[in-house]
Image (cartoon, grey):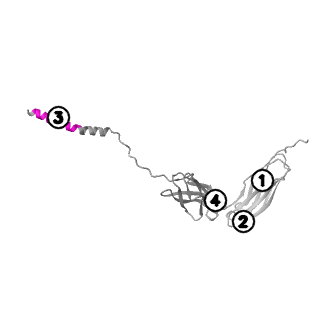
């Protein structure tokens, strides 16, 4: 009798545990769901580039960095301000409000003549709102060369087919505070003449001296080489040499009626 009672008790205890074991098995077999972390909204303004690097620039009155952008959001973007890192940088913006899908541009302008030579890096922070405050940085790099004496172009290539003279121009630029004097210019070809054309002082560029190069209409058929030599008072650049490569071909003769 006692053994029968014990067997019944064990059976009842086992049956009581079965639901718990089944629930554990079901929970273990259920595939776990990945933890989803909502990503923050992306900024609405997308720029075609965030860095403009001009490298070493030529003497000039102004350089520009151009940045195009698009509103890829679902709401209108309000551009509140563009804050430059330097007073020498002047930003210009095409529009302060852009509807979804609209495009615009920001131009960063500067005058390198007022800056010291060397590698430069500037930036401008674009502050706008697309439903929440945003800020994007645009970077503008360039290298301002040492002030020096130069001539352009470095070489001249002239093609001639008729019997009329061909004219070209050489420009000597000196962007130093105390520019060198141009003493004269010569050419070693009887078919080429070099003449002083103009001298002027360009703000932000320096003193410019222009020479007119005239190639005679009597240049013989074929290829010819010549050299223009410009003499200066600069002890570091007493002579500036510009090679000329001249091509003359037969004129096309029209048949007589």
What is the x, y in percent for residue 171?
A: 74, 58
Write down the residue under mark 3. 11
* Local secondary structure at mark 2: strand
* Residue beneath the point at 63% across and 65% down: 114
Query: In this view, which residue lies farthest toward the left?
Result: 1
**Mark 2 surroundings: few (<14), some (14-19) or many (≥20) residues within 10 A:** few
Please tell me whether residue 7 belongs to the stretch shown in magenta: yes
Write down the residue under mark 1. 227
* Local secondary structure at mark 3: helix
**Mark 3 surroundings: few (<14), some (14-19) or many (≥20) residues within 10 A:** few
First reached walking from the N terminus: tag 1 or tag 3: 3
- Which contiguous range is marked in magenta? 3-18
Q: Is residue 168 or residue 48 the one in the foreground? A: 48
**Mark 1 surroundings: few (<14), some (14-19) or many (≥20) residues within 10 A:** some
137 on left or right of 159? left
| Magenta span dominant secondary structure | helix
Query: In this view, which residue lies farthest toward the bottom?
Result: 178
């Amino acid at each position: 009798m006692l053994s029968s009672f014990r067997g019944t008790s064990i059976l009842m205890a086992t049956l009581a545990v079965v639901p718990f074991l089944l629930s554990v098995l079901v929970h273990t077999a259920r595939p776990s769901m990945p933890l989803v972390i909502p990503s923050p909204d992306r900024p609405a303004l997308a720029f075609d580039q965030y860095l403009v690097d001009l490298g070493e620039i030529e003497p000039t009155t102004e350089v520009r960095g151009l940045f195009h952008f698009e509103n890829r959001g679902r709401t209108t973007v309000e551009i509140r301000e563009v804050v430059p890192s330097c007073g020498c940088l002047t930003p210009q913006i095409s529009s302060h409000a852009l509807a979804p899908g609209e495009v615009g541009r920001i131009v960063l302008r500067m005058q390198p003549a007022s800056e010291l030579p060397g590698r430069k890096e500037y930036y401008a922070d674009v502050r706008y709102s697309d439903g929440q405050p945003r800020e994007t940085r645009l970077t503008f790099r360039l290298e301002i060369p040492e002030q020096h004496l130069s001539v352009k172009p470095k070489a001249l290539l002239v093609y001639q087919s008729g019997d009329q003279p061909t004219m070209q121009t050489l420009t000597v630029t000196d962007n130093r505070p105390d520019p060198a004097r141009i003493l004269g210019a010569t050419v070693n070809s009887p078919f080429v003449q070099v003449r002083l054309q103009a001298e002027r002082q360009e703000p932000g560029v320096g003193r410019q001296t222009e020479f007119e190069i005239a190639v005679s209409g009597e240049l013989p058929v074929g290829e010819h080489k010549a050299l223009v030599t410009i003499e200066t008072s600069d002890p570091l650049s007493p002579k500036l040499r510009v090679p000329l490569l001249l091509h003359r071909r037969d004129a096309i003769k029209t048949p007589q009626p």
